Image (spheres, grey):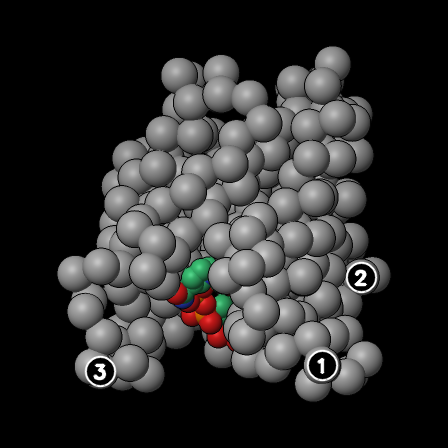
Amino acid sequence: MSTVIITGANGNLGLVVTEHLLSVGYRIIAITGPGGAGQLPRHSSLITKEADLGNEHKTDELVTSLADQYPDIKAAVLLVGGFAMGRLQQTSDEMLEHMIRLNFFTAFHMVRPLFSWFEKSNAGGQFILTGSRPALIPHEGTAFFGYSLSKAMVVGLAGYINAEGADKNITASVIVPTTIDTPANRKAMPQADFARWVSPVHIAESIAFCLSGAGKNLQNNILFLGKPS
Ligand SMILES: NC(=O)c1ccc[n+]([C@@H]2O[C@H](COP(=O)([O-])OP(=O)(O)OC[C@H]3O[C@@H](n4cnc5c(N)ncnc54)[C@H](OP(=O)(O)O)[C@@H]3O)[C@@H](O)[C@H]2O)c1
């Protein structure tokens, strides 16, 4: 059994991805925020750790201790992120910093020590990062500039992982979902056409494919998921 780390595992998407990867046989290290295990299932292959991934040193220590304890870690699925409205003209440094901390640094703090460990172990490894359409298509992100720019940094991070990892069997893919059909989104947008949204189960299945033997052959992968609105 190989081990996969999932961050944001107790979030709306994280719960579904965690359940799916458990169901296809991975051991999962589920990293949760201050909300704790929340609705995560009880499962013999599920290890839960609570951490603030915005904290550089604590995250470094956590990854080092996990790598020592579970040397078969093959991948990290980095789902932590969050959204805020605000056009460029209304975005203060503070708002932008908040978005970058939440979307970029929570991923980067995991990637840096794990990349070094994948490199040292000679086994390679995979990162699945979470982008968003406006990160790649600025025209779709003018109403949420800070969010879009911070997700663009996440997409950029994947590019650097692929460049740095090219001869080391270390790769990164980015999932780029449209609005996800989660209970939180249904509550926030009750008038929307839910049928246009992307199913979290389909995202989980796409992630499982990326992690599979066949999926590992995909290079510099950006996975657009769902119909653009
Ligand atoms: N929802 C959408 O429609 C949509 C669309 C496109 C992209 N995305 C992206 O998809 C990802 C998942 O979205 P979601 O809807 O599942 O989000 P969510 O329900 O808000 O979950 C986010 C998770 O991140 C955790 N988290 C936040 N800050 C943290 C920190 N400093 N350290 C550790 N954990 C932290 C939260 O934990 P606690 O609950 O414990 O605080 C929560 O479990 C995000 O990156 C989001 O930007 C979402």
Tell me residue 192's x, y (percent). 23, 75
Viewer-nearest residue: 107 or 85: 85
Q: Residue furthest front?
A: 139
SS assignment at label 2: helix
SS assignment at label 3: loop
- Mark 2, mark 3: which one is toward the viewer? 3
Q: Is residue 95 visible?
A: no
- Mark 2, mark 1: which one is toward the viewer? 1
Disc with the residue nearer the chain's start (2 vs 1)? 2
Q: Please give the residue where the numbered disc 1 appears in the rendered image.
A: 89
**Callout 1: few (<14), some (14-19), or many (20+) C-alpha neighbours within 10 Å?**
few
Q: What separation in Å lies between label 2 and label 1 (alpha carbons)? A: 30 Å
Residue drawn at x 69%, y 28% as measured from the top left: 162
Tell me residue 207's x, y (percent). 40, 38
Q: What separation in Å lies between label 2 and label 3 (alpha carbons)? A: 38 Å
Q: Please give the residue where the numbered disc 3 appears in the rendered image.
A: 190
SS assignment at label 1: helix
Q: Amino acid at mark 3?
A: Pro
Q: Amino acid at mark 1?
A: Gln
Q: Please give the residue where the numbered disc 2 appears in the rendered image.
A: 56
Residue drawn at x 64%, y 70% as measured from the top left: 145
Disc with the residue nearer the chain's start (3 vs 1)? 1
Residue drawn at x 44%, y 38% as measured from the top left: 223
